[in-house]
Image: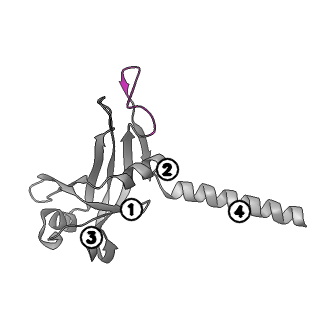
Amino acid sequence: MNNERAESNHLRVRFLRVYSLQKSMFSEKETEYIKSQRLARFATVSPESLQPDVVPVGFDFNGTDFYVGGKNLLNSTKYRNVLKNNKVALAIDDLKPGESWEPRGIKIFGTAGVTENHEGYLGNATYLKVTPKKKWSWGIEAPVFVDGKFVVNRSKA
């Protein structure tokens, strides 16, 4: 009986580990990198003119979703664009500390929606919640260049 209970608990713990790994598309190293950064580039597209708009933004990250705000968010181009076209892109990148030129970063395609009364980096406010659908990362899990080739990790939600 105790062996059956131990085996059942072992399988339950293993299932929870696998489930939690599947829940986030970001690896542990990617999550650490994202949480170490304070600035991202946020892209939206006007549905009328099809003009892309890219702006630097602060953000919060909870392990799965991103929250983008702004001092005057409700009057911003990004806010108006998201209300009419929820497809967005987010890029977080930098150069690895040191004297060599080693870029690293993450690019995300996803959807955004308005979230009110979210407690984030600007306090309790309205934010755009970005739910990632695809991501590419480079220079985080492994060197960005291997044998002269650019190495990119890709995944989908």
Of mark 2 and mark 4, the one earlier in the sequence is 4
Identify the mark at residue 127; answer none if there is no mark: 3
The answer to whether any part of residue 77 appears in the image is: yes
> Which residue is at the far left?
49
User: Which residue matches tag 1?
Assistant: 65
Q: Could you tell me how far apart the alpha carbons at marks 3 and 4 are, in whole angstroms?
A: 36 Å
**SS for tag 2?**
helix
Q: Residues within 10 Å of mark 2 (few under 14, many from 20)?
A: few
Q: Quadrant of residue 38?
A: bottom left
**Which is in the foreground here, disc 1 or disc 2?**
2
Q: Is residue 51 left or right of residue 139?
A: left
Residue 23: give x, y in percent of width and height.
51, 58
Nearest the eye: 87 or 53: 53
Residues 40 and 136: in front is 40
Q: Which mark is residue 129?
A: none
> Which residue sits at x=33%, y=75%?
119
Q: Residue at x 26, y 57 (%)?
A: 87
Amino acid type of disc 4?
Arg
Q: Earlier in the sequence, mark 3 or mark 1?
A: 1
Which mark is drawn over residue 12? 4
Element under label 4?
helix
SS of the residue under disc 3: strand
Q: Which three-letter amino acid code belongs to the residue tagged 3?
A: Tyr
Give whichever of discs 3 and 4 has the lower sequence position: 4
| Sequence-wise first label, 1 or 2 | 2
Mark found first going from the N terminus, 1 or 4: 4
Answer above or below: position of 16 versus 28.
below
Q: Provide residue 48's location: percent of width, then percent of height.
A: 10, 59
Residue at 44 percent across and 45 percent down: it is 155
Residue placed under numbered mark 2 in the picture: 28
Percent position of residue 56, x then y: 19, 54
